[in-house]
Amino acid sequence: MREIRSAPQPKVIFNVGDGKEIQAMYYGDCPAYPFVPGPNVVRRLLERGYGVYFVLSVFARNEEPLAALEAAGLLKRTQAVYIPAPVILPRQNPYEN
């Protein structure tokens, strides 16, 4: 998100999951939404000069709307922010250092 902050304005982030829109807006310095808009909305944003970003995770949320954007040829004109899979750390006794 900090890399998005340094990108030129205006910009918008979509597909932010887990109720993290507020954090995405803070760190990205732009509006953030939990959904994927339709092709017409993305097309209009791109025509107006917006940088359009999509958060993509290994959990593959919102595959159908993203497929519709791919079919319309719009996905390649946007930027993807990849979220890696969470790593499970070994449990430690809280009294061990």
Image: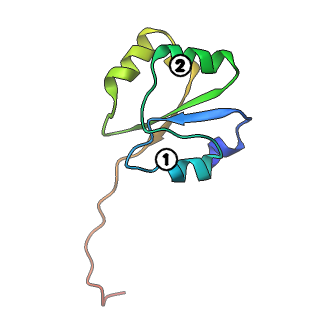
Q: Which residue is mark 1?
A: 21
Q: Tell me the tag on residue 35.
A: none
Q: Earlier in the sequence, mark 1 or mark 2?
A: 1
Q: Residue at x 45, y 50 (%)?
A: 20
Question: On screen, 89 above or below 10?
Answer: below
At mark 1, the secondary structure is helix
Q: Is residue 16 left or right of residue 4?
A: left
At mark 2, the secondary structure is helix
Find residue 79 and report its horizontal and vertical position in percent: 56, 29
Q: Give whichever of 43, 61 is nearer the camera.
A: 43
The amino acid type of the residue labelled 2 equals Val
Find residue 27 and report its horizontal and vertical position in percent: 60, 52
Q: Residue furthest bottom?
A: 95
Q: Residue at x 44, y 16 (%)?
A: 69
Image quarter of residue 47: top right
Q: Tell me the tag on residue 41.
A: 2
The amino acid type of the residue labelled 1 equals Glu
Q: Give whichever of 84, 30 is nearer the camera.
A: 30
Q: Is residue 97 left or right of residue 92?
A: right
Number of other residues with Cα within 10 Å of mark 2, as a class: few under 14, some 14 to 19, many 20 or more? few
Number of other residues with Cα within 10 Å of mark 1, as a class: few under 14, some 14 to 19, many 20 or more? some
Image color mode: rainbow
Find residue 30 and report its horizontal and vertical position in percent: 63, 42
